[in-house]
Image (cartoon, coloured by chain):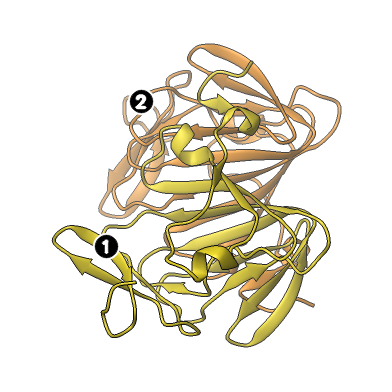
Chain colours: A orange, B yellow
Amino acid sequence: MLKLPALDPAAVEEKRGSGYPEPFKSHMGDRVKRRLGAACGLKNLGVNLVTLGPGGQSAVRHWHTLEDEFVYVLEGEVVLVTNAGEQPLRAGMCAGYPAGSKDAHHFINRSQKPAKYLEMGTNVPGDTAFYPDDDLFISWTEEGMAYTHKDGRKY
Amino acid sequence: MLKLPALDPAAVEEKRGSGYPEPFKSHMGDRVKRRLGAACGLKNLGVNLVTLGPGGQSAVRHWHTLEDEFVYVLEGEVVLVTNAGEQPLRAGMCAGYPAGSKDAHHFINRSQKPAKYLEMGTNVPGDTAFYPDDDLFISWTEEGMAYTHKDGRKY
Protein backbone atom coordinates (compact mmCIF):
# COMPACT_ATOMS: atom_id res chain seq x y z
CA MET A 1 0.00 0.00 0.00
CA LEU A 2 1.66 3.22 -1.18
CA LYS A 3 1.69 6.30 1.03
CA LEU A 4 1.63 9.91 -0.16
CA PRO A 5 3.40 11.48 -1.93
CA ALA A 6 3.32 8.09 -3.77
CA LEU A 7 -0.05 6.98 -5.07
CA ASP A 8 -1.61 3.96 -6.77
CA PRO A 9 -4.20 5.39 -9.20
CA ALA A 10 -6.47 2.41 -8.40
CA ALA A 11 -6.91 3.91 -4.91
CA VAL A 12 -8.37 7.16 -6.33
CA GLU A 13 -12.12 7.61 -6.68
CA GLU A 14 -13.55 7.30 -10.21
CA LYS A 15 -15.50 10.32 -11.40
CA ARG A 16 -18.07 9.88 -14.17
CA GLY A 17 -20.10 12.54 -15.94
CA SER A 18 -19.25 16.14 -16.75
CA GLY A 19 -20.31 19.66 -15.88
CA TYR A 20 -21.44 20.43 -19.45
CA PRO A 21 -25.13 21.04 -20.13
CA GLU A 22 -26.94 18.62 -22.46
CA PRO A 23 -26.49 17.62 -25.22
CA PHE A 24 -22.73 18.05 -24.66
CA LYS A 25 -22.70 16.05 -21.44
CA SER A 26 -24.04 12.96 -23.24
CA HIS A 27 -21.53 13.38 -26.07
CA MET A 28 -18.72 12.60 -23.61
CA GLY A 29 -19.98 9.00 -23.53
CA ASP A 30 -18.34 6.50 -21.20
CA ARG A 31 -15.64 8.71 -19.69
CA VAL A 32 -14.10 8.02 -16.28
CA LYS A 33 -11.55 10.28 -14.59
CA ARG A 34 -9.30 9.80 -11.60
CA ARG A 35 -8.00 13.11 -10.27
CA LEU A 36 -4.44 12.07 -9.45
CA GLY A 37 -2.96 15.53 -8.94
CA ALA A 38 -5.68 16.62 -6.53
CA ALA A 39 -5.32 13.30 -4.67
CA CYS A 40 -1.65 14.23 -4.08
CA GLY A 41 -2.59 17.70 -2.82
CA LEU A 42 -1.54 19.61 -5.96
CA LYS A 43 -3.26 22.96 -6.42
CA ASN A 44 -1.49 24.49 -9.45
CA LEU A 45 -1.11 21.39 -11.60
CA GLY A 46 -4.09 19.22 -12.58
CA VAL A 47 -3.36 15.63 -13.60
CA ASN A 48 -6.16 13.22 -14.47
CA LEU A 49 -6.01 9.57 -15.50
CA VAL A 50 -8.85 9.14 -17.99
CA THR A 51 -10.46 6.00 -19.41
CA LEU A 52 -12.49 6.79 -22.52
CA GLY A 53 -14.88 4.16 -23.82
CA PRO A 54 -15.63 3.54 -27.53
CA GLY A 55 -17.50 6.55 -28.94
CA GLY A 56 -16.54 8.79 -26.03
CA GLN A 57 -14.97 12.25 -26.18
CA SER A 58 -12.37 13.86 -23.92
CA ALA A 59 -14.15 17.24 -23.95
CA VAL A 60 -16.12 19.55 -26.21
CA ARG A 61 -13.54 20.77 -28.75
CA HIS A 62 -12.03 23.88 -27.13
CA TRP A 63 -8.99 26.02 -26.50
CA HIS A 64 -7.89 27.72 -23.27
CA THR A 65 -6.81 31.32 -22.85
CA LEU A 66 -4.34 30.85 -19.97
CA GLU A 67 -4.03 27.12 -19.28
CA ASP A 68 -1.27 25.03 -20.86
CA GLU A 69 -2.58 21.51 -21.49
CA PHE A 70 -0.82 18.24 -22.34
CA VAL A 71 -2.05 14.69 -22.97
CA TYR A 72 -0.16 11.38 -23.14
CA VAL A 73 -1.84 8.23 -24.43
CA LEU A 74 -1.22 5.16 -22.23
CA GLU A 75 -3.39 2.47 -23.82
CA GLY A 76 -5.51 2.07 -26.94
CA GLU A 77 -6.00 4.68 -29.63
CA VAL A 78 -7.80 8.00 -29.84
CA VAL A 79 -8.34 10.49 -32.65
CA LEU A 80 -7.09 14.00 -32.01
CA VAL A 81 -9.31 16.61 -33.69
CA THR A 82 -7.88 20.10 -34.19
CA ASN A 83 -8.57 22.98 -36.59
CA ALA A 84 -6.42 21.20 -39.21
CA GLY A 85 -8.37 17.94 -39.03
CA GLU A 86 -7.83 14.52 -37.48
CA GLN A 87 -4.78 12.50 -36.44
CA PRO A 88 -4.84 9.08 -34.75
CA LEU A 89 -2.80 8.87 -31.54
CA ARG A 90 -1.86 5.47 -30.21
CA ALA A 91 -0.24 4.52 -26.90
CA GLY A 92 3.03 6.38 -26.35
CA MET A 93 2.00 9.41 -28.44
CA CYS A 94 1.20 12.80 -26.94
CA ALA A 95 -0.08 16.30 -27.68
CA GLY A 96 0.44 19.71 -26.12
CA TYR A 97 -1.77 22.79 -26.31
CA PRO A 98 -0.14 26.11 -25.42
CA ALA A 99 -2.28 28.66 -23.59
CA GLY A 100 -3.80 31.16 -26.00
CA SER A 101 -3.27 29.07 -29.12
CA LYS A 102 -6.66 29.18 -30.87
CA ASP A 103 -6.24 25.65 -32.24
CA ALA A 104 -9.23 23.99 -30.55
CA HIS A 105 -8.76 20.33 -29.71
CA HIS A 106 -10.30 17.20 -28.25
CA PHE A 107 -9.99 13.41 -28.39
CA ILE A 108 -12.61 11.03 -29.78
CA ASN A 109 -12.36 7.29 -29.25
CA ARG A 110 -13.41 5.86 -32.63
CA SER A 111 -12.01 2.41 -31.79
CA GLN A 112 -13.82 -0.60 -30.35
CA LYS A 113 -11.76 -0.64 -27.15
CA PRO A 114 -11.35 1.70 -24.19
CA ALA A 115 -8.45 4.13 -24.42
CA LYS A 116 -6.50 5.38 -21.43
CA TYR A 117 -4.58 8.64 -21.22
CA LEU A 118 -3.13 11.20 -18.83
CA GLU A 119 -4.40 14.76 -19.22
CA MET A 120 -2.66 17.57 -17.38
CA GLY A 121 -2.85 21.34 -17.22
CA THR A 122 -1.96 24.40 -15.22
CA ASN A 123 -4.61 25.91 -12.94
CA VAL A 124 -4.50 29.62 -13.72
CA PRO A 125 -6.86 32.21 -12.19
CA GLY A 126 -8.87 33.94 -14.91
CA ASP A 127 -8.51 31.13 -17.43
CA THR A 128 -11.43 30.54 -19.76
CA ALA A 129 -12.13 28.41 -22.83
CA PHE A 130 -13.82 28.82 -26.21
CA TYR A 131 -15.76 26.22 -28.23
CA PRO A 132 -15.68 27.01 -31.97
CA ASP A 133 -17.90 24.08 -33.11
CA ASP A 134 -20.71 24.46 -30.62
CA ASP A 135 -23.17 26.91 -29.11
CA LEU A 136 -21.36 26.81 -25.79
CA PHE A 137 -19.82 29.69 -23.84
CA ILE A 138 -18.38 30.19 -20.37
CA SER A 139 -20.14 33.14 -18.73
CA TRP A 140 -18.61 34.63 -15.60
CA THR A 141 -20.74 36.29 -12.93
CA GLU A 142 -20.22 37.21 -9.29
CA GLU A 143 -21.39 33.68 -8.47
CA GLY A 144 -18.67 32.11 -10.60
CA MET A 145 -18.67 30.44 -14.02
CA ALA A 146 -21.64 28.96 -15.85
CA TYR A 147 -22.04 27.32 -19.25
CA THR A 148 -24.43 29.30 -21.45
CA HIS A 149 -25.40 29.65 -25.08
CA LYS A 150 -23.10 31.99 -27.01
CA ASP A 151 -25.70 34.78 -26.67
CA GLY A 152 -25.60 34.38 -22.87
CA ARG A 153 -28.92 32.52 -22.42
CA LYS A 154 -28.83 29.79 -19.78
CA TYR A 155 -29.09 26.14 -20.69
CA MET B 1 4.23 11.45 -39.17
CA LEU B 2 2.34 13.41 -36.50
CA LYS B 3 2.01 17.17 -36.76
CA LEU B 4 1.81 19.58 -33.84
CA PRO B 5 -0.06 19.82 -31.54
CA ALA B 6 0.35 16.00 -31.77
CA LEU B 7 3.83 14.65 -31.17
CA ASP B 8 5.66 11.34 -31.29
CA PRO B 9 8.18 11.46 -28.42
CA ALA B 10 10.67 9.56 -30.61
CA ALA B 11 10.91 12.70 -32.77
CA VAL B 12 12.13 14.81 -29.82
CA GLU B 13 15.84 15.31 -29.19
CA GLU B 14 17.37 13.29 -26.33
CA LYS B 15 19.10 15.37 -23.67
CA ARG B 16 21.76 13.75 -21.50
CA GLY B 17 23.61 15.23 -18.57
CA SER B 18 22.48 17.75 -15.96
CA GLY B 19 23.22 21.28 -14.82
CA TYR B 20 24.37 20.13 -11.36
CA PRO B 21 28.02 20.58 -10.37
CA GLU B 22 30.08 17.47 -9.62
CA PRO B 23 29.79 15.12 -7.81
CA PHE B 24 25.99 15.47 -8.16
CA LYS B 25 26.04 15.47 -11.94
CA SER B 26 27.67 12.03 -12.03
CA HIS B 27 25.19 10.68 -9.46
CA MET B 28 22.40 11.09 -12.03
CA GLY B 29 23.95 8.20 -13.98
CA ASP B 30 22.46 7.20 -17.32
CA ARG B 31 19.55 9.64 -17.49
CA VAL B 32 17.99 10.74 -20.79
CA LYS B 33 15.23 13.34 -21.07
CA ARG B 34 12.96 14.32 -23.91
CA ARG B 35 11.36 17.73 -23.32
CA LEU B 36 7.88 17.00 -24.67
CA GLY B 37 6.11 20.06 -23.27
CA ALA B 38 8.68 22.47 -24.70
CA ALA B 39 8.55 20.63 -28.04
CA CYS B 40 4.81 21.43 -28.14
CA GLY B 41 5.43 25.10 -27.32
CA LEU B 42 4.30 24.96 -23.69
CA LYS B 43 5.75 27.69 -21.47
CA ASN B 44 3.94 27.23 -18.14
CA LEU B 45 3.88 23.44 -17.96
CA GLY B 46 7.03 21.34 -18.21
CA VAL B 47 6.61 17.71 -19.28
CA ASN B 48 9.62 15.44 -19.75
CA LEU B 49 9.80 11.80 -20.81
CA VAL B 50 12.72 10.34 -18.87
CA THR B 51 14.61 7.07 -19.29
CA LEU B 52 16.64 6.26 -16.19
CA GLY B 53 19.26 3.54 -16.42
CA PRO B 54 20.16 1.13 -13.60
CA GLY B 55 21.81 3.06 -10.76
CA GLY B 56 20.59 6.42 -12.06
CA GLN B 57 18.77 9.14 -10.13
CA SER B 58 15.97 11.48 -11.26
CA ALA B 59 17.49 14.46 -9.39
CA VAL B 60 19.31 15.38 -6.21
CA ARG B 61 16.71 14.85 -3.45
CA HIS B 62 14.92 18.21 -3.21
CA TRP B 63 11.69 20.10 -2.69
CA HIS B 64 10.37 23.15 -4.57
CA THR B 65 9.00 26.32 -3.03
CA LEU B 66 6.51 27.25 -5.78
CA GLU B 67 6.48 24.45 -8.34
CA ASP B 68 3.94 21.62 -8.19
CA GLU B 69 5.55 18.41 -9.49
CA PHE B 70 4.08 15.07 -10.56
CA VAL B 71 5.62 11.84 -11.86
CA TYR B 72 4.00 8.81 -13.53
CA VAL B 73 5.97 5.59 -14.06
CA LEU B 74 5.53 4.12 -17.56
CA GLU B 75 7.96 1.19 -17.58
CA GLY B 76 10.18 -0.62 -15.11
CA GLU B 77 10.50 0.18 -11.42
CA VAL B 78 12.04 3.02 -9.45
CA VAL B 79 12.45 3.67 -5.74
CA LEU B 80 10.91 6.88 -4.44
CA VAL B 81 12.94 8.36 -1.59
CA THR B 82 11.24 10.92 0.67
CA ASN B 83 11.75 12.15 4.24
CA ALA B 84 9.80 9.07 5.45
CA GLY B 85 12.04 6.59 3.62
CA GLU B 86 11.72 4.48 0.49
CA GLN B 87 8.83 3.08 -1.54
CA PRO B 88 9.12 1.08 -4.78
CA LEU B 89 7.04 2.45 -7.66
CA ARG B 90 6.34 0.21 -10.61
CA ALA B 91 4.72 1.03 -13.97
CA GLY B 92 1.31 2.61 -13.51
CA MET B 93 2.13 4.15 -10.11
CA CYS B 94 2.62 7.87 -9.58
CA ALA B 95 3.62 10.52 -7.06
CA GLY B 96 2.78 14.20 -6.59
CA TYR B 97 4.74 16.87 -4.76
CA PRO B 98 2.83 20.01 -3.79
CA ALA B 99 4.73 23.30 -3.93
CA GLY B 100 6.09 24.28 -0.52
CA SER B 101 5.79 20.81 1.00
CA LYS B 102 9.19 20.25 2.64
CA ASP B 103 9.12 16.52 1.91
CA ALA B 104 12.20 16.26 -0.33
CA HIS B 105 11.99 13.57 -3.00
CA HIS B 106 13.75 11.83 -5.85
CA PHE B 107 13.74 8.52 -7.74
CA ILE B 108 16.59 6.00 -7.78
CA ASN B 109 16.63 3.10 -10.21
CA ARG B 110 17.88 0.19 -8.07
CA SER B 111 16.74 -2.39 -10.66
CA GLN B 112 18.76 -4.04 -13.42
CA LYS B 113 16.63 -2.52 -16.21
CA PRO B 114 15.95 1.00 -17.51
CA ALA B 115 12.88 2.69 -16.09
CA LYS B 116 10.75 5.16 -18.00
CA TYR B 117 8.57 7.87 -16.50
CA LEU B 118 6.87 11.17 -17.20
CA GLU B 119 7.85 14.09 -14.96
CA MET B 120 5.85 17.29 -15.05
CA GLY B 121 5.72 20.55 -13.19
CA THR B 122 4.54 24.13 -13.27
CA ASN B 123 7.01 26.83 -14.35
CA VAL B 124 6.62 29.54 -11.73
CA PRO B 125 8.74 32.73 -11.61
CA GLY B 126 10.67 32.92 -8.32
CA ASP B 127 10.59 29.18 -7.70
CA THR B 128 13.59 27.69 -5.96
CA ALA B 129 14.53 24.31 -4.46
CA PHE B 130 16.26 23.01 -1.35
CA TYR B 131 18.46 19.90 -0.97
CA PRO B 132 18.40 18.58 2.62
CA ASP B 133 20.86 15.69 2.10
CA ASP B 134 23.59 17.55 0.25
CA ASP B 135 25.81 20.62 0.31
CA LEU B 136 23.92 22.16 -2.60
CA PHE B 137 22.11 25.48 -2.76
CA ILE B 138 20.55 27.63 -5.47
CA SER B 139 22.02 31.15 -5.27
CA TRP B 140 20.32 33.95 -7.17
CA THR B 141 22.24 36.90 -8.51
CA GLU B 142 21.56 39.57 -11.11
CA GLU B 143 22.98 37.13 -13.67
CA GLY B 144 20.44 34.44 -12.75
CA MET B 145 20.66 31.23 -10.71
CA ALA B 146 23.78 29.27 -9.88
CA TYR B 147 24.39 26.11 -7.87
CA THR B 148 26.66 26.80 -4.89
CA HIS B 149 27.71 25.25 -1.59
CA LYS B 150 25.27 26.01 1.23
CA ASP B 151 27.62 28.75 2.48
CA GLY B 152 27.46 30.42 -0.95
CA ARG B 153 30.93 29.37 -2.25
CA LYS B 154 30.97 28.46 -5.91
CA TYR B 155 31.54 24.90 -7.09
Q: Give the residue at mark 2.
A: A150
What residue type is disc 2 on?
A: Lys
Q: Name the quadrant of the C terminus of chain B.
A: bottom left
What residue type is disc 1 on?
A: Met
- In the rendered view, does A142 fall on the left or right side of A90? left
Residue at 31% x, 55% y: name it.
A143
- Label 1: which secondary element: strand
In which quarter of the view is residue A116 placed?
A: top right
Q: How crowded is mark 2: few (under 14 residues within 10 Å), some or many (20 or more)?
A: some
Q: Name the quadrant of the N terminus of chain B.
A: top right
Q: Give the residue at mark 1.
A: B145
- Image x and y of residue A54, in percent: 79, 30
Which residue reaches farthest top?
Answer: A84
- In the rendered view, does A9 fall on the left or right side of A86? right
Which of the two residues, B35 or B154, is positioned nearer the viewer here? B154
Which of the two residues, A96 or A81, is positioned nearer the viewer here? A96
Which residue reaches farthest right?
Answer: A112
- Image x and y of residue A77, in percent: 76, 29
Residue at 58% x, 20% y: name it.
A81
Image height check: is A83 above or below A28? above
- In the rendered view, does B139 fall on the left or right side of A67? left
Q: For residue B115, say whether it is visible.
A: yes
In which quarter of the view is residue B147 placed?
A: bottom left
Q: For residue B126, say whether it is visible.
A: no
Image height check: is A150 above or below A51? above
